[in-house]
Amino acid sequence: METFWVSLSAALAVAIPALATAWAQSRIGPAAAASLTEKPELSTTAIIMIAIPETMVILGFVVAVIIMLRGGGAAG
Amino acid sequence: MIVPMAKVRLIGAHAHLVDAIRVVQDTGLLHLAQPPTLGVPSAPASPALVERRIRQLRRILDDVLVTRGLLRTPSPPPAPTDTPDIHTLARWARDAHRLRRQAERLRDRRASLEEERALVVRYQRFFGAFASLEAARSRLADVSAYHVVLRRDQSGHLDRLRSALRERLGDSFELLAQVLPSGETAVLLLVPAGFAQRIDALLAEARVQEVPMPAGYGGTLAEAIPRLLQRFGEIPSELAALDEELAGLARRHGAELARAEAALHDELQRRQALGLSGGTAHAFVMEGWLPAGREPTLAAALDRHFHGQVVLETIGREHWHAADAPVVLRNPRLFRPFEMITGMLPLPRYGTIDPTPFVGVFFPMFFGLMVGDIGYGIMLALLAAVLHWRSRPSTTLRSVSEVAGACAAFAIAFGFAFGELFGDLGLRWFGLKPLLFDREHEVMAFLGLAVAIGVVHIVLGLLLAAFTSRRHPRAALGHGLSALMVLLVAVAMLAALGQLPRALLTPAAITALVAFPVIVVLEGIVAPIELFSTFGHILSYARIMALGTASVMLAIVANQMVGAMGSVLVGVVFALLFHLVNFGLALFSPTVHALRLHYVEFFGTFYSPGGARYEPLGRWSPSRERPA
């Protein structure tokens, strides 16, 4: 039973930030594309802007790994 | 590094101004600055006159460029050393204008012929069908003809149309139809001339459209078809004649136009330079920057031409601001390709730090840490070799290939460190053991390594910030103390986790507590926020571990496909495809995140953008295009 909760916690730790990242990128993507059509020189800024929300899911992934390792969810 | 610059001043007799500008242009060293204000009313060049001349030159250049584009003449030769006199300029202006009109007329005629050819081709598929239908029509007199083409999916419309016509006109119409090879149906409808209006309404009701009559070929399709067929034969030869005429113009005038383009670019730059001179009615003065140490080259060139009538003096460093100086980056050959990455941001200000050498070390390192696989590294190295082979020196593609080569080298090196060859294939086939640790199983060790690299990178950035702001001791001390705080917190945490002797915990914590209020005093109330933000930036380096772990897991999943598909062959194919996908991801994601770690986390600590590019007055060449 404990493995179930550990696994669920780890899954949520990734899933919720992933949804947040997806939502943020869905807003940034079109804005970046629109900016690039007018000013192609903003490509670097656009890449950075799109990569910024990925921090959430990456840190979520790190937290999930820690939960799995510390909570014993990774055993077996 | 940012090349140190020297500011110089040219002073000479007003009569030598134009020649002096030409000498400066020939040496190609001086980036001109705004003219100095001398506190005297007169200037050697009237701004209005200079502006007018520039406008005139731009007009001629525009004619030349448009004409060259239309005639598709080859690239201009190296800029001529002689300066065009007023008669040559007038001739170029006249010829370019005339040639432009001539070339535009030929272009328009060509476009119109192309349009006509497209129209004829469009109608060609109906010709045969309508021609035979028209032959039947010729037996009837005083009738209106309607030409309709029904699409393949409209074939049912024909019966409906026939019934509707019979309902309204009785037997006083004739409907001839022929199925085309394309599946469409050509329909010729013949009705007494008086029924025209009713037929228009009926066709609209049946949702079928009459084939529009091409303009200029007669009132009916019967008249149009022979003329269209005749034009179909004539147009290619007319197009060939036009092309020959354009080619003839290019042959006769191409070389002269190319020479005019180069010379006009040069002349335009000289005129613009004239606007950057100051002085009196008898003397001129110009100021500008050039790389430190190149002053004797320019001085010698001026001396050769003017024998002391135009002199060059170096302006002392204390008389100009670093913010005004232009920036040129010059790095060792090893790091030069990485200027491409720095160049994606605005140039750093003069007097600050060019981060290219640091990017040259850390960018491929981060990439290698994230990919960390001998197999993928070799694939990337092969890709880099192909790019290198296909690219020319000093191009962006060449830089990309060299950066990719460095990334591949780091990926292979870390592949040995983590014992990975296409995931766990190295271990299974060759018993490859990790030299550092196994990324698949020792995730926490990888996380620790990623954060430790983050600490090093950010502390380096803070130290660079302290160095950059060395003329402002308060700011420099603040950045230095921030770096110290980061190190102290890292030491305290490692001591608390038992990775360092526990005896270090108390001294590190106390020193950090003492340093904190000092930072607040030095940098103000924003200091604590910036400090927390710095720790956030360090944690952001965990992405190295996250992407690295994802990469190795995907590679292992790909290998497991071989045994999971029932058939070994299908499994191998799927595994190869999955590895290919993983390689594609390995090219994209680590690049974007390594860039982000540099642009946001690292550069954010010290980088001062806003430097003006060093653009010396020089001879124009096609590869050195600058806005006129």
Image (spheres, rainbow, N blue to C red):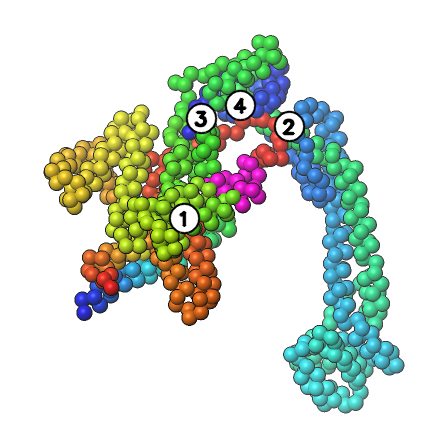
Q: Report helix, strand or loop for mark 3.
A: loop
Q: Dot 2, crowdedness within 10 Å: few (<14), some or many (≥20)?
A: many
The residue pinned by badge 3 equals B3
Q: Which chain does the residue under circle 3 lie in?
A: B
Q: Amino acid at mark 4?
A: Leu
Q: Report helix, strand or loop for mark 1.
A: helix
Dot label at residue B374: 1
Q: Residue drawn at (68%, 81%), measured in percent from left and top? A: B155
| Marks 1/3: CA–CA distance | 38 Å
The residue pinned by badge 4 equals B30
Q: Nearer the viewer, residue B162 or B533?
A: B533
The residue pinned by badge 2 equals B267
Q: Dot 1, crowdedness within 10 Å: few (<14), some or many (≥20)?
A: many
Relative to B499, B202 lies left or right:
right
Of labels 3 and 4, earlier in sequence is 3
Q: Quadrant of residue B203?
A: bottom right
Measured as percent of width and height from the top left, residue B174 is found at 80, 84
Q: Which chain does the residue under circle 1 lie in?
A: B
Of labels 1 and 3, earlier in sequence is 3
| Marks 3/2: CA–CA distance | 29 Å
Q: What predominant SS class does the magenta segment belong to?
A: helix
Dot label at residue B529: none
